[in-house]
Structure formats: C-alpha cells, structure tokens
Amino acid sequence: MWFEVTRHRREALNHPDILFRKVILDKPPDGLLLAMSKAFSLDSGEIQTLSLALQHRDSLLFTDDAAARFVTEQMGFKVHGTIVRAIRRGYLSARDVATYSLSYQNKVPCT
C-alpha cells in the first residue's frame, strides 16, 4: 500500500494533521488469508494490508475493491469502501472521519 500511495498520491503523505508510519511486516500472511487471496485474486497491497490488520484486530479498513471487502468481512473485520463513498451514503460524516483519523494517528500504520 505504501508503494501505491507514494506512486500515485505522494502529496497525501504530507498532511500536517495525520502521522503515517511505514511498517514492514515481520511475518508472512497466514494460510487462510493466502488461500482467500488466491481464490479472489487480491493483489499484494491488499494482502499486506490484511496481514497487518490481522496483527491489529481493532482495525477499520477502507478499500474500493469488492473482492477485498468480501475477504475482509469473511475474516471478521469492519470494512468500508472508499471514505468518500461512506460519507456520501451517510455511513460516516466528514467530522467522523477527521475525528477517527486524528484519534488513531499514532495507531494507523501503512504497509
């Protein structure tokens, strides 16, 4: 995920109110995740993100990929599509997103 952000949205990492940390996974994905990833054709960024979430079980994940959302739900995580979509559909307000982001700024690593 870090690679994708630095390649396509580098300016997002410079937000003054949010601290991002680059995290290197210290163990490979578990067998269930690898099997589901293969079955649903998840890419390496999605696999890394889910691996990290397995280490941080209170995670809230955002992904615009339907297959990744399905796998995420099957693994017992809370999942949403993009933040913008969640706001548009009334699941979250912009204030909710800002509050959540700021309250978790030291707890939200990026792979």
Image (tube, rainbow, N blue to C red):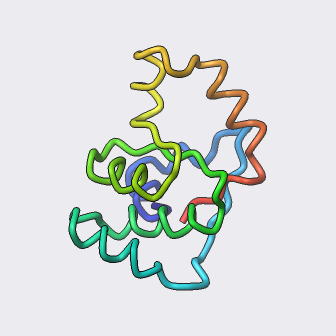
97 or 29: nearer the viewer: 29
Please state, as top left, top right, bottom left or bottom right, where the C terminus lies in the image. Answer: bottom right
Residue appearing at x 74%, y 46% in the figure: 105
Is the residue 53 above or below the residue 78 in the image?
Answer: below
Is the residue 17 above or below the residue 105 in the image?
Answer: above
11 or 111: nearer the viewer: 111
Question: Would residue 54 appear left or right of 82 to someone viewing this image?
Answer: right
Residue appearing at x 28%, y 64% in the figure: 42
Is the residue 65 above or below the residue 28 in the image?
Answer: above
Question: Would residue 68 appear left or right of 92 to someone viewing this image?
Answer: left
Q: Position of residue 96 (x, y in %)?
A: 65, 23
Residue appearing at x 57%, y 61% in the figure: 53
20 or 69: nearer the viewer: 69
Q: Where is residue 103 in the image (x, y as percent from the top left)?
A: 78, 38
Residue sitting farthest toward the bottom: 27
Please state, as top left, top right, bottom left or bottom right, where the N terminus lies in the image. Answer: bottom left
Q: Position of residue 28 (x, y in %)?
A: 49, 84
Q: Where is residue 12 in the image (x, y as percent from the top left)?
A: 54, 43
Question: Would residue 35 appear left or right of 53 to someone viewing this image?
Answer: left
Residue appearing at x 74%, y 54% in the figure: 107
Question: Would residue 51 appear left or right of 35 to someone viewing this image?
Answer: right
Tell me the quarter of the picture where residue 44 sits: bottom left
Counting the numbered discs, the total is 0
22 or 90: nearer the viewer: 90
Tell me the quarter of the picture where residue 82 sits: top left
